[in-house]
Image (cartoon, grey):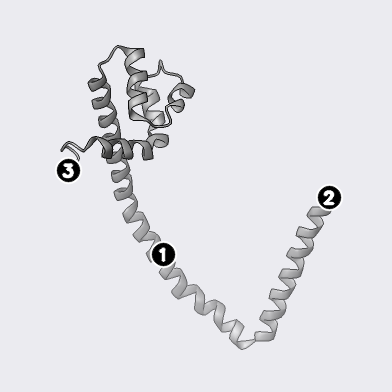
Amino acid sequence: MDASSPQPNGSFEHHFRDRFESLLPTIQKRWPELAQHTLEATRGSVDELVRLIEQNTGLTPQGVREQLEELMHTAGDRGRHLGESLDPLEEQLEQLLDELNSTLRPRIEKPVRQRPLLAVGVALGVGVLLGAMLNGGRRS
């Protein structure tokens, strides 16, 4: 369904209720005369929120509903754009991790394979030191 095509009333209400917490700051910016606790008291009910905004602003119920739909649509667009902008960063991070894995792993595995007892001893020593430090921190 296209974002500009009308949604069934129940569908809008369901999506609005699901996203109410994340939309709350935007709603407060749009209607600063409404107290946060008053908005929160609607618990995401579109009908209650429309009634509240209508009473405090003089807008028609249809006008309020249209503005809420616009706010929800705009917030969805922002989230989509943010997700798209993070895609290249995610790819770059995956490449760096692959590169790190291919260069660092052999450098760590070689000494461990050559001297396994030394590696176990160092690991044991580090574990004992960390345990002592953590246990000592609890006593104070």
Dot 1 falls on a residue whose secondary structure is: helix
Q: Name the residue under label 2.
A: 140
Judged left or right of residue 91, residue 135 is: right
Residue 22 or residue 122, whichever sits in front: 22
Closer to the chain start, of discs 3 and 2, is 3
Q: Which disc number belongs to residue 62?
A: none
Say which residue appears at 34% left-offset and 20% top-offset.
51
Dot 3 falls on a residue whose secondary structure is: loop
**Callout 2 crowding tier (Cα within 10 Å): few <14, some 14–19, many ≥20:** few
Q: Distance between the residues labelled 1 and 3?
A: 38 Å
**Callout 3 crowding tier (Cα within 10 Å): few <14, some 14–19, many ≥20:** few
In the rendered image, the quadrant that contains the N terminus is top left
Q: Mark 1 points at which residue?
A: 96
Up-down relation of residue 80 to residue 71 (above or below): below
Tag 2–tag 1 contact (CB < 8 Å): no
Location of residue 34 (image quadrant): top left
Say which residue appears at 36% left-offset and 55% top-offset.
89
Closer to the chain start, of discs 2 and 1, is 1
Closer to the chain start, of discs 1 and 3, is 3
Judged left or right of residue 124, residue 52 is: left
Q: Name the residue under label 3.
A: 2
Residue 18 or residue 92, whichever sits in front: 18
Up-down relation of residue 98 to residue 35 (above or below): below
Q: What's the amino acid at mark 1?
A: Leu
Tag 1–tag 3 contact (CB < 8 Å): no
Dot 2 falls on a residue whose secondary structure is: loop
Q: What's the amino acid at mark 2?
A: Ser
| Nearer mark to the viewer, of 1 and 3 | 3
**Callout 1 crowding tier (Cα within 10 Å): few <14, some 14–19, many ≥20:** few
Q: Distance between the residues labelled 3 and 2?
A: 62 Å
Judged left or right of residue 131, residue 92 is: left
How far from the left and from the top, in percent, is residue 135? 79, 59
